[in-house]
Image: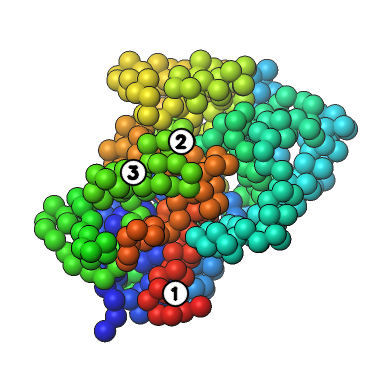
């Protein structure tokens, strides 16, 4: 008889793990509190158009393919994937813009507009950071970091030293590049995992490097298309998905997880996989005294968290040629405004990311509307320093609109808004149980990365596993897909003497 697994949460991590376990013959049930699976990778659906709720940048496509191939399916049969070019259009507050193409000769035109020295610096930045990425990927990102003796082999220590991550991203970039716009463009992207480029380790500069060298991609239909296909395969393989059911506690007997208590009662199982946010799970779904659990160097109380986001969703009845699929607007006083977010203040002049999928995808808008997600980084709810009331929201919305209207070519955008909506850190907290409304879970500081990050299981409690963005290797859909592979391998090892 196969072991029964309950997965708490149908986010990308829960779906991917469920699918892999089904493929290995487990009896899988996914319990999701919301009415639809996907977690943060979700949809905002209106009659004539739909928005990707959060994630929009698809970089590193291999883990997306790997999961589909894991269950012996052909990725290209289910997804129409397009390469995005330019990968970014970058607007500066001085009303200039720059296109970053992934064709080298076109990229050089943009770079040489800055200076020949910075062109060379940018290329050198890519080369050096690529070397770090290969090392990180080969040694750390694909494997569990549970066994410290295995990890801390002299060879691995050498690799860690070679990564030179102790510098912050901004200073690391500055070693290569003089121009502020170019530096800030790279630093802005290193914030995609929710950490400040002025504090966070320089390893996150691998994000802009990967986008530039490996490209960015778009799945027709948006990110949610990937979720829909995973859901379909889970059901085809005999898995069960129950939405609209809230897990209230994990049932533990003799230090062993053997079921979950939901709003409808106790459900027994052999294995519990938690895809619900790690800190929320420890604090709310396990016993109170587990708050004393040590994660890496720290108890739960001392853990640092990523920032959050405010998103404005706009549908427009006019097309705007000035926008590309991915756009970044770099505002003045980048450093001050960025640092504010991480000390609990709203930025005065925020830099923003504008996602315009309608440039490449006409399956999301029945009448050809322009679809925009405008995203601003904001403080998480840890300090309770920002009150998310109507006034705050109006203020942010006005600020965002004034930035958009200041861009040459978007002056009349306000008159063409036919739909608007927004998402705040409070929504992330209430919808998906994101602890303190953090967008990317536990912060990937050096002391909360690799073996210091929560791993896919904790020694103290048996038959209990974790997958998701607060778990090693970290946040972002591609990393969470890797996390699902790591946790599945660990379960197979524990239950089937797999090696
Ligand atoms: C604004 C924003 C922008 C982003 N942009 C990108 C991007 O461009 N590219 C990218 O790759 N990544 C991006 N990310 C990150 C990416 O979305 C996440 O890393 C990833 O989706 C996390 O997946 P997960 O499975 O770990 O968690 P989640 O998506 O949080 O899934 C957890 C699930 O558990 C459910 N749950 C929680 N508690 C319970 C309970 N008690 N009972 C039952 N169910 C429960 C939740 O409802 C949720 O469905 C972004 C994130 C945000 C917030």
Q: Which quadrant of the figure has residue 61?
A: bottom right
Residue sitting at x 33%, y 20%: 387
Question: Is residue 98 something that shows in the picture?
Answer: no
Q: Residues within 10 Å of mark 3 (few under 14, many from 20)?
A: few
Return the residue nearer the eye: 226 or 332: 332
Residue 499, x across and y down, in percent? 51, 78
> Which residue does the numbered mark 1 point to in the structure image?
493
> Which residue does the numbered mark 2 point to in the structure image?
304
Quarter of the image with the N terminus is: bottom left
Q: Which quadrant of the figure has residue 320?
A: top right
Residue 113, x across and y down, in percent? 82, 30
Q: Which mark is residue 292?
A: 3
Q: Earlier in the sequence, mark 1 or mark 2?
A: 2
Q: Do the residues bearing badges 1 and 3 touch, measured as CB atoms within 8 Å? A: no
Q: Earlier in the sequence, mark 1 or mark 3?
A: 3
Q: Is residue 354 above or below residue 266?
A: above
């Amino acid at each position: 008889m196969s072991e029964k697994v309950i997965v708490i949460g149908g986010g990308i991590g829960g779906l991917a793990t469920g699918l892999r376990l089904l493929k290995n013959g487990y009896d899988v049930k996914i319990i999701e509190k919301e009415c639809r699976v996907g977690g943060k990778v979700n949809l905002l659906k209106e009659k004539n158009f739909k928005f990707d709720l959060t994630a929009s940048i698809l970089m590193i496509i291999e883990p997306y393919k790997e999961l589909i191939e894991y269950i012996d399916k052909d990725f290209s049969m289910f997804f129409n994937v397009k390469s995005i070019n330019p990968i970014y259009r970058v607007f500066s507050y001085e009303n200039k813009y720059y296109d970053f193409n992934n064709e080298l000769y076109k990229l050089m035109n943009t770079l040489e507009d800055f200076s020949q020295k910075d062109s060379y610096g940018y290329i050198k930045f890519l080369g050096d950071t690529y070397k770090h990425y290969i090392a990180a990927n080969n040694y750390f990102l694909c494997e569990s970091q549970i066994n410290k003796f295995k990890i801390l082999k002299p060879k691995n220590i050498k690799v860690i030293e070679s990564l030179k991550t102790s510098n912050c991203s901004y200073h690391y970039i500055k070693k290569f590049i003089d121009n502020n716009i170019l530096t800030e463009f790279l630093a802005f992207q290193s914030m995609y995992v929710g950490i400040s480029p002025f504090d966070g380790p320089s390893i996150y500069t691998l994000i802009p490097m990967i986008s530039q060298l490996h490209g960015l991609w778009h799945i027709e239909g948006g990110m949610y298309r990937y979720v829909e296909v995973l859901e379909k395969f889970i059901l085809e393989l005999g898995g069960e998905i129950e939405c609209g059911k809230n897990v209230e506690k994990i049932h533990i007997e003799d230090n062993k997880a053997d079921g979950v208590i939901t709003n409808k009662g106790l459900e027994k199982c052999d294995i519990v996989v938690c895809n619900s946010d790690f800190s929320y799970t420890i604090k709310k779904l396990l016993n109170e005294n587990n708050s004393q659990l040590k994660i890496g160097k720290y108890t739960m109380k001392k853990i640092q968290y990523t920032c959050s986001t405010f998103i404005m969703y706009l549908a427009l009845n006019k097309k705007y040629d000035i926008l590309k699929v991915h756009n970044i607007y770099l505002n003045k006083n980048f450093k001050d405004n960025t640092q504010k977010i991480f000390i609990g203040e709203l930025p005065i002049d925020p830099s923003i990311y504008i996602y315009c999928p309608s440039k490449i995808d006409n399956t999301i808008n029945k009448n050809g509307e322009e679809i925009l997600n405008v995203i601003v980084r904001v403080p998480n709810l840890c300090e309770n320093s920002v009150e998310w009331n109507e006034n705050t929201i109006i203020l942010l919305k006005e600020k965002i609109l004034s930035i958009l209207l200041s861009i040459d070519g978007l002056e009349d955008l306000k008159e063409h808004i036919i739909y608007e909506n927004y998402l705040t850190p409070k929504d992330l907290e209430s919808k998906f149980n994101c602890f303190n409304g953090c967008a990317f879970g536990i912060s990937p500081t050096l002391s909360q990365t690799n073996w210091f990050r929560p791993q896919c299981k904790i020694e103290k409690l048996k038959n209990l596993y974790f997958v998701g963005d607060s778990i090693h290797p970290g946040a972002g859909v591609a990393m969470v897909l890797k996390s699902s592979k790591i946790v599945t391998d660990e379960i197979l090892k524990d239950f089937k003497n797999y090696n």
